[in-house]
Amino acid sequence: MYFTIDETRTALKEGKIKSAELVQNSIKTYEDDKSASIPLNAFIEMYEDSVSKAEEADKEIAEARSKGTEALDKLFEEKPLLGIPFANKDNINSKGHKLTCASKILEGYVAPYNATVIERLEKAGAIPLGRCNQDEFAMGSSTEYSCYGPTRNPINREYVSGGSSGGSAAAVAANQALFGLGTETGGSVRLPASYCGIYGLKTTYGVLSRWGVVAYGSSLDQVGILGHTPQDIALPLSLMTGIDTFDDTSADLPDSDSLKKLTALTEEEFKTLKIAIPKQFLKTDGADPDVIKCFEETKKWFETKGAKIDEVDLPVLDASIAAYYVIALSEAASNLSRFDGIRYGRRVDNQKGYDELYVDTRSEGFGPEVKRRIVIGNYVLSEQFSGDTYKKGMTVRARIQRDVAKVFESYDIILCPTCPTAAFKLGSKVDNPLEMYLSDLYTTFVNLARIPSINVPAGRTSSDNMPIGMQFAGKMFSEPKILRLAQNWEKDHPQIGIPVKE
């Protein structure tokens, strides 16, 4: 069966398991899966030095244990994640390891430095296992747009794992890693968490440094965390947060110390909880009946616990999908202009000139979805074609931020489904980009408002038993509160997402 981080730390301290065994088990699972008739394809590759790092962790633990309980406790206080392996998304730099963003254009590229989040996790003793599959340059909602092929859902491999952080979500859900790192631009952590039946947190913009994360939409991108329980998210978060001199948008998280030992809300605290449900998210057009039923059951749970629920009117949310794609695709077109065949990555040198080199390199290196988004983004940014569309998108975004912040003056949580549907079958939407984009219907407002939100496993579909997720969104820097609330949920709904593997 899988262990939580707390259970694993206890087992490591007591000598019941070794970090090297955990890593080797993950590697074996990965190797076995590669030869399966229908591979999961969560990890692209395992890092070659993961075993040696785990062995070093085991030596540290054994040495401290030989000195007594006090020395052992001190070691784990200094390195709270010592010996704990985790999954890393393929767009987060891990020094000395390949990084491709699941794109041919970065084939063979090796990260020259650690992303800040990786640096801080390693300082805390955690061990990067390997890089996980994703939609190319994080552009997608299903992890089907990858040069490595799709990642499948561990619940049913005929279905997608969600995207763009589908590899990390599938790795955690399949018990190949204790927790995983993903990235979010418009729902790319919460959505695969929902599809795979695990917890997934999108943090407040700035709480986790973006240094060393390959940019998609810079004003929206954030690192997120995937885990089996809220505590499995809270502890890594507490160790990664904080201002980073390499990232001017980074910010401190108040009360981050409370995350190290996460406690659920008390009965008294729960009875003072005020929940807002936007009327715009009560429309049932396009939403699966099972999702609607699950949403109703979630509302009832809050009411039985004593929370107050009100419907609120946020008309600007109707424009969130449009505003999101205008902003995200414009910034993507700008950010991806650096991949030109000159500075790094793939180069198609036809000896004809720089213009031809750019065109041929990008035509061969980028996949169809990335090309589609670059073309749309450049169109939006071309004043002679679309005028001030990007500026209008930013104006709508400012309105969303303002109106959502106003809601949090009176309410603690915004409650809504994570996605209109559960996971869909592989290939069913890949040729219909508009339908794929609508998967982000309930998630993009969170990124535009720069607030935190967590997906919680909330149920299963009646027809094919696929997971359904709900999300709790809070005001900026309210991660401790929404994680405590998720702890209440997990306590009343243990392991609702995926079956425990024996």
Image (cartoon, rainbow, N blue to C red):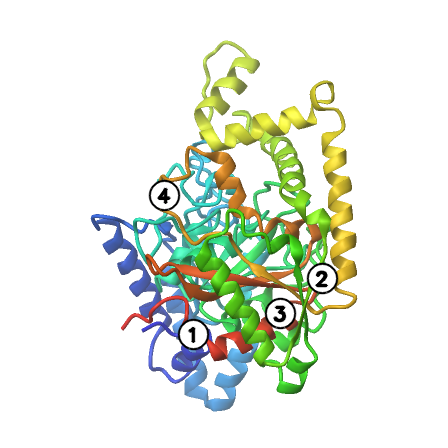
Q: Amino acid at mark 2?
A: Met
The reply to whether residue 124 is in sight is: no
Q: Quick one: label 2 or label 1, which is nearer the N terminus? A: 1
Disc number lying in front (2 or 1): 2
Residue at image location 55% in from the left, 47% down from the top: 440
Mark 2–mark 3 distance (CA, rounded to whole Å) = 11 Å
Q: Quick one: label 2 or label 3, which is nearer the N terminus? A: 2
Q: Residue 338's spot in the image, x, y percent? A: 59, 30
Mark number for residue 12? Answer: none
Which of 186 and 136 lies nearest the eye of the viewer? 186
Residue count near mark 2 (Cα–Cα under 10 Å), binned few <14, some 14–19, many ≥20: some
Say which residue label 2 marks. 476
Q: Report if the CB atoms under discs 2 and 3 are less than 8 Å apart.
A: no
Say which residue label 3 marks. 482
Which of 203 and 491 lies nearest the eye of the viewer? 491
Q: Quick one: label 1 or label 3, which is nearer the N terminus? A: 1
Say which residue label 4 marks. 150
Q: Secondary structure at mark 2?
A: loop
Q: Report if the CB atoms under discs 1 and 3 are less than 8 Å apart.
A: no
Query: Seen from this angle, which residue lies furthest top?
Result: 352
Q: Amino acid at mark 4?
A: Pro
Residue count near mark 3 (Cα–Cα under 10 Å), binned few <14, some 14–19, many ≥20: many
Mark 1–mark 4 distance (CA, rounded to whole Å) = 27 Å
Seen in the picture, residue 17 relative to 366 is either above or below; the reply is: below
Residue at image location 47% in from the left, 66% down from the top: 458
Which of 368 and 67 lies nearest the eye of the viewer? 368
Locate the C terminus by quadrant: bottom left
Q: Amino acid at mark 1?
A: Thr
Mark 1–mark 3 distance (CA, rounded to whole Å) = 19 Å
Q: Secondary structure at mark 3?
A: helix
Seen in the picture, residue 100 relative to 333 is either above or below; the reply is: below
